[in-house]
Image (spheres, rainbow, N blue to C red):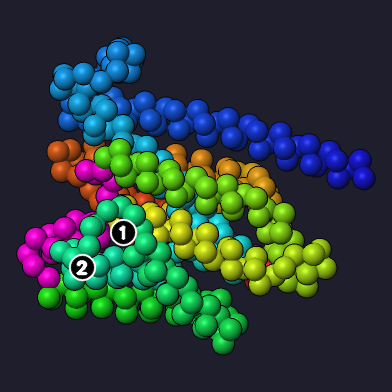
């Protein structure tokens, strides 16, 4: 009993240390994002602008209207996508599951693309409309993946199914583009490549209104999630209503990934790589510890990736999905190799 208590204390201590380090990294990332760009500013200038508030100067407009909304959106959506990936991995009990790999992001992209092309002139294209369209697409593809998961017990085969479904969704989106106007094609192409650029405070507020409550709701499910990780039978013996719980996981994961896809386009590998990195840092898979940490880790990851995307080849800007793939894909490859080696041993 004493050994178990010591292990719990060490785990809690490690959690607090990592949380503080991630918060420090996030503050540094946000500060660098404010200062670096086509117009560089010193820390003293940034502090002066933050102290004085908005004014009519060019520097103030750059900081408050362009850089600050963009970096905050990157932090919120990066955390949301990471939590979404962790929820899917908990649902399928597999660290390779994620909204991009299972085709869920592609489904959201498909419905949003169809909405942008065919309904843009008939309904108001607000951020909420985009989120609703993406949520419908996410749920539709999730239902298809769940249907196959009942028939296919091999997770590797299920991932193949998810990838194929993603290709089908991309094909449908490409067919829809055939009937689009040139302006719609430009807007859809720009959005579908994934970017935090050009977003204002309305997008930040919308993302915060959706992602923070959904992430808190996911954290409140930590206890049944921990029981579910040990098997459905164990979860039932602990009093978990498995079917409503599984439904809640899917709805929360779909809502989080839909919000990201609607506001920033499809972003790859964050939902797989960041939860794995977080579990390695914590040396624990306890949801009550992982969920807040994975949100912060995802925020740091996406803010730094966005900084690289807009500065490394400045004035040319890379797509955020390109940068996240460069850093996230090697983590996923290493994870799969490590898992295979452990199975062989």
Q: Residue placed at 83% from the left, 68% from the top?
A: 237
Point out residue 291 in the picture as x, y percentages from the top left corner.
59, 48
Q: Is residue 93 visible?
A: no
Q: Quadrant of the C terminus?
A: bottom right
Point out residue 295 in the picture as x, y percentages from the top left corner.
52, 45
Element on which disc 1 rests: helix
Q: Quadrant of residue 201?
A: top left
The label nearer to you, 1 versus 2, is: 2
Task: Please check the rendered image and state whether residue 182 is part of the magenta-colored stretch, yes or no.
Answer: yes
Q: Which residues are magenta?
A: 180-199
Task: Please check the rendered image and state whether residue 234 is part of the magenta-colored stretch, yes or no.
Answer: no
Q: Is residue 162 left or right of residue 68?
A: right
Q: Residue placed at 65% from the left, 33% from the top?
A: 16
Point out residue 323 in the picture as x, y percentages from the top left corner.
32, 50
**Cα separation between marks 1 and 2:** 11 Å
Camera-side residue: 125 or 28? 125
Q: Residue placed at 22% from the left, 22% from the top?
A: 60
Give me the disc on residue 130.
1
Camera-side residue: 337 or 46? 46
* Residue position for label 2: 119
Picture layout, residue 68 above or below residue 333: above
């Amino acid at each position: 009993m004493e050994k178990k208590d010591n292990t719990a204390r060490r785990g809690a201590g490690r959690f607090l240390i990592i949380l503080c380090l991630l918060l420090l990294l996030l503050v540094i990332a946000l500060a660098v994002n404010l200062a670096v760009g086509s117009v560089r500013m010193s820390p003293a200038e940034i502090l002066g602008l933050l102290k004085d508030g908005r004014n009519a100067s060019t520097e103030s407009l750059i900081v408050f209207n362009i850089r600050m909304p963009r970096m905050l959106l990157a932090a919120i959506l990066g955390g949301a996508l990471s939590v979404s990936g962790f929820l899917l991995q908990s649902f399928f009990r597999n660290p390779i599951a994620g909204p991009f790999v299972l085709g869920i992001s592609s489904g959201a992209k498909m419905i949003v693309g169809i909405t942008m092309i065919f309904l843009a002139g008939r309904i108001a294209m607000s951020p909420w409309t985009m989120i609703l369209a993406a949520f419908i697409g996410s749920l539709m593809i999730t239902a298809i993946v769940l249907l196959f998961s009942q028939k296919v017990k091999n997770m590797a085969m299920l991932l193949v199914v998810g990838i194929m479904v993603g290709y089908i969704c991309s094909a449908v989106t490409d067919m829809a583009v055939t009937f689009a106007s040139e302006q719609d094609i430009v807007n859809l192409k720009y959005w579908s490549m994934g970017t935090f650029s050009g977003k204002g405070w309305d997008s930040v507020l919308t993302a915060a209104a959706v992602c923070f409550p959904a992430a808190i709701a996911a954290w409140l499910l930590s206890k049944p999630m921990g029981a579910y990780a040990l098997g459905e039978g164990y979860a039932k013996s602990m009093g978990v209503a498995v079917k409503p719980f599984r439904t809640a996981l899917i709805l929360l994961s779909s809502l989080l990934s839909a919000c990201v896809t609607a506001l920033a386009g499809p972003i790859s590998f964050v939902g797989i790589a960041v939860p794995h990195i977080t579990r390695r840092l914590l040396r624990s898979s306890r949801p009550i510890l992982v969920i807040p940490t994975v949100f912060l880790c995802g925020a740091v990851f996406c803010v730094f990736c966005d900084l690289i995307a807009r500065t490394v080849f400045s004035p040319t800007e890379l797509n955020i999905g390109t940068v996240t793939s460069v850093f996230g894909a090697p983590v996923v490859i290493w994870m799969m190799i490590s898992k295979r080696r452990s199975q062989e041993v």
